[in-house]
Image: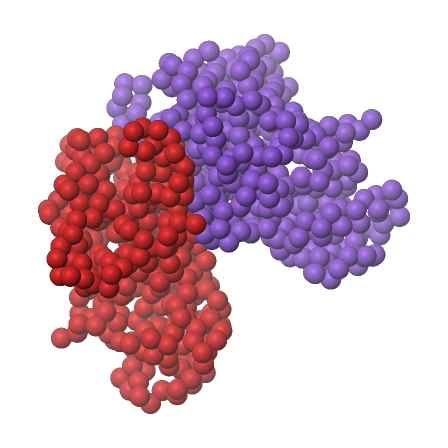
Chain colours: A red, B purple
Amino acid sequence: MYSHHFSINNIPFGIASSSSHPDKAAATRFEDTVIFLDELAKYHSSLSSSTVSTFSLETLNSFAALPKSQHAETRKWIQSHLTNIASLPPSTKSPISETTLHLPLSIGDFTDFSCSRSHVLNAAEAVFGKRSLPPGFEYFPVGYHGRTSSIVPSGTPIVRPNGQYRDEEGKVVFGATKRLDYELEVAAVIGKPSVLGEPVAIENADEYIFGCVLLNDWSARDIQGFEMTPLGPLHGKSFATTISPWVITLDALSPFKIPAVARNSDIILPLYLQDPDPLPTFEIELKAEIQPKDGSEATVICKSKFSSLYWTLRDLVAQQTVNGCSLRTGDLLVTGTISGDKTGENGCLLEMVAKGGIKVKNVKGTVETKMFFDDGDTVCLSAYAGEGVGFGDCVGTILPAK
Amino acid sequence: MYSHHFSINNIPFGIASSSSHPDKAAATRFEDTVIFLDELAKYHSSLSSSTVSTFSLETLNSFAALPKSQHAETRKWIQSHLTNIASLPPSTKSPISETTLHLPLSIGDFTDFSCSRSHVLNAAEAVFGKRSLPPGFEYFPVGYHGRTSSIVPSGTPIVRPNGQYRDEEGKVVFGATKRLDYELEVAAVIGKPSVLGEPVAIENADEYIFGCVLLNDWSARDIQGFEMTPLGPLHGKSFATTISPWVITLDALSPFKIPAVARNSDIILPLYLQDPDPLPTFEIELKAEIQPKDGSEATVICKSKFSSLYWTLRDLVAQQTVNGCSLRTGDLLVTGTISGDKTGENGCLLEMVAKGGIKVKNVKGTVETKMFFDDGDTVCLSAYAGEGVGFGDCVGTILPAK
């Protein structure tokens, strides 16, 4: 019935500009048309002025911080205009191909959690030759803080980073990474801020989540491997992180709510991680593709499911705040790499190293093996929940090191 | 000659408010008087309007992002008024005791590096019973990303965090940390931003550093210990980080420049870490004190030296950006715990655990042993370079868990 990612059932929020609308402003997308909300509000608005005043700002932070009721009201207001989109004034509309999409929010903090049991087991096998979980994995979402200055919107080229690492003979060298990887992830974008010192109860977690974006946590595995003991990843990841430009709201995702996976029944979780919601997560199909620089056809390199995660986005809100840490509007709470157990479900290349890498079509129609990315490769993440609700693309092309 | 931290040789920058100046504004401090720069500029200004316009903002970010020449000009302009401070209009001045000091900048990213060889060796001995360095330690500054939403100005109470950890029998429990610790650190505050994808050469590093503050990287050692493998510290630190309110500029610190410590001569560092500056660091005396809740006299628990660090602030700028990561105004690049090798030079309590803890005076005049902090304890960091140039205090009092 619906196949486009941006049907009337979606109504994502982003920040856009175009030649006819050079100032950045809040926007939504219907099929292949971007609609500027500041212009739409001039044409017709039943919304409160506190909502409308956020539409002409350069980020969605002020809009995202509004009560959820105002987001829902905005969503309905937009939907009411889509039944006759042809009648909207030209100033409100721009074809997606002629629109620039920007970072949707100013991001204060970015925590990347480790939510996928399969990813952790696959990665441990690849690095240590043994499928084992980190000590805390089944007790709470473990994770690390990420860098926010280098978060870029989809389409921004990714410069291959330099750094120090051990070469194949074990010698420490400085140079361009030889093991550039992606990670297929989903980020919860915080709307309502929380108060320092006051944990958010898991039953209230949704109130704080404005919506979700796709996130590619680009990783230089050689740099990361050398630095990681004991303080975790830093320079191996801080060179760039790509997010998709459209924030998909929980309202849009709510028809796809499903139960979470079963957890280790030997562990009784503390109350702050006992979620009373029987449908705390979402069925979303995730996909990663690579388009090699030779212009050959894209190859799907991963298909995995958001619902396979051991920890939910609601768990991440509870975990991040249980120690009193505050949330600010625009913060990202992220799932970590989302992988499955089966062949073709690996959400990063590291997991495939021991299995001989990935198979990629080249321009001659033959299939080549790739261990990590080459300069010129384009990586595209996408996600689709169903019924015309998808995330669109999260794309980056790798440029040579400087 | 000078003994006050805030003599005419210092001229720090901060954000202040008072009952007579309720709006936050840029300020400096001379001895025990806070001077509001927006009011001082109304009284007399020889500064450019681009400088003056930043004085009435709620953070120092815009001021910090100005060229260094404008900071130097502002410093001289302030100094010219201090010779006759009595003649300044009352609206420009507020006694420090009647002034509220706020977070001086909006902080986008906070990287905590590991620069103290002694700390790393002492901590390894405390945790693993063996003095060993992390694999990368002598090759580059290793580190982790910290949380910025929970960075608070000196004086903000610190609520003891809850979390999961292994108790003494090895059972995983949830509750208030029993091992609450401090870390004595210094942060470089970024002024001039850098461009994503473009490393900052080490010889230009000072251009990007607006100044320095003290930083207490509060740590819950039990929570941290359970979560840290393999992704590093997160919830064990994200509950709160305290910084001192006054940014001490490199101009104020420049009389105290000295050579860095000798490095491992077996390792040839890559060019990006070869600093041509023969005086790349500073002689600064650091101190930590504890004031127990019983009101007894404060006990000095650490004295250490900034100059003992294996890596300099200039190294941190080069390291953070070598992979293309960008710096934004307000970012913090931090030294990690600053410890020495001798007794009394331990910049956190963890290092003292195996040595039987610290000795603290109580109200009865007797001395008690303390392994970690109790509720009600006040921890005060301070630092003094010399000639009337100091950092003032960085203070936090521990409140019971919620």
Q: Residue furthest bottom?
A: A87
The residue shown at (60%, 26%) is B260
Q: Is A73 displayed left or right of A281 in the figure?
A: right
**Rendered image quadrant of residue A272:** top left
Is residue B235 visible from the viewing direction of this image?
no
Location of residue B160 in the rendering, given as x and y in whole percent from the top left corner:
45, 32
The residue shown at (13%, 61%) is A365
| Residue A196, placed above or below residue A397 | above
Q: Residue furthest left?
A: A342
Question: Front-most of A57 and B132?
Answer: B132
Location of residue A1 in the rendering, given as x and y in whole percent from the top left corner:
13, 75
The residue shown at (41%, 62%) is A103
Q: Is B60 displayed left or right of A181 in the figure?
A: right
Question: Front-most of B186 and A44?
Answer: B186
Q: Is A66 displayed left or right of B201 in the figure?
A: left
Question: Front-most of B265 and A226?
Answer: B265
**Rendered image quadrant of residue B224:** top left
Location of residue B204 in the rendering, given as x and y in whole percent from the top left corner:
60, 44
Is residue A63 visible from the viewing direction of this image?
yes
State how many labels appear. 0
The residue shown at (56%, 48%) is B330
**Rendered image quadrant of residue A86:** bottom left
Location of residue A95 in the rendering, given as x and y in whole percent from the top left corner:
34, 79
